[in-house]
Image (cartoon, rainbow, N blue to C red):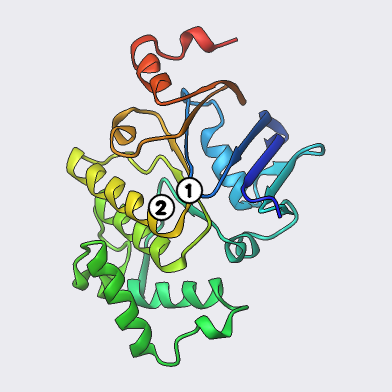
Amino acid sequence: MTKGLQLTNLQVSIDEKQILNGVSLTLKPGELHAIMGPNGSGKSTLAYALAGHPSYTILSGSKVTLDGEDIIELSPDERAQKGLFLAFQYPVEVPGVSVQNFLRQAYQARFASEPNRQFKTVLAFRNHLKAIAQELKIDETFLRRGLNEGFSGGEKKQLEILQLAVLEPKYVILDETDSGLDIDAIKKVAKAVAVLQKKFSLGVLVITHYQRILQYLKPDVVHVLVAGKIKQSGGPELVEKLEKSGYTTLKD
């Protein structure tokens, strides 16, 4: 079996307008890739299309496989069960649903096909959740709050990292996780991602505008997305080059 999240000639449209024009890359277990690019280049389109958002249409000739299995026809829930995780740029608020109850439902759905992974009681799951929160240095009171209800930007990102740890995905897409965060919050999120990447041998795809988070999450490969195409790929040194010269030299 071929291990990896593999994109081959990925073309995506929304409202009959084509946004991605043939994106190809392979993210292997344990690797961290960064996608950078200017506004409107298709970065978030890439994230939502991979997660299976119904508003985005993957066009004929595209191929997306997860560990060798074609996932284009799978629903978002089915993709999640296969081990694909998307951390949204703007997580939604759900009043009346506690963090711990939400995570319990998400866990049950993720491991629905693995009865041996299910917890026999609510208390057993909560103890499991508390242990994960302690490992990630997240306050236990956080678990009893309403889902994203009154959360700061940093708290929303902490919740997504906690969700990531609970669901144990194989491949993770972080869509502008550093957006709106101060330096301390970025460091905390990046440290948690690094811990989980090592623990689960995660393949991580970080979508970002800026160099900041990549100072703490060291990418193996950096891809520059411009006008729906990968214009250049390279190592971490490419980030420094972009900080100096910007994206203008890469535009059509």
- In depth, the one of 50 and 220 nearer the eye is 220
Q: Going by the picture, which residue comes out furthest to the right?
A: 60
The tag on residue 30 is 1
- State whether residue 225 is above or below residue 43: above
Determine the CA span between mark 2 and mark 1.
Answer: 6 Å
Q: In the rendered structure, which amino acid carries the disc numbered 1?
A: Gly
- Which one is in front, 146 or 32? 32
Residues under numbered marks 2 and 1 in contact, where contact means CB atoms less than 8 Å apart: yes
Residue ranking furthest to the front:
1
> Where is 96 relative to 79, above or below?
below
Q: Position of residue 70 (x, y in %)?
A: 74, 52
Q: Is residue 149 visible?
A: yes
Q: Quadrant of the C terminus?
A: top right
Report which quarter residue 120 is drawn in.
bottom left
Q: Earlier in the sequence, mark 2 or mark 1?
A: 1
Q: Residue at x 63, y 52 (%)?
A: 52
Q: Which residue position is annotated with label 2?
A: 197
Disc 2, SS = helix
> What residue is at 34 percent from the left and 39 percent from the top?
217
Where residue 189 appears, as percent x and y from the top left, is 29, 49
Q: Which amino acid type is marked by label 2? A: Gln
Bin the neighbour count of mark 2 within 10 Å (Cα to Cα): few under 14, some 14-19, many 20 and up: many
Q: Position of residue 54 (x, y in %)?
A: 66, 52
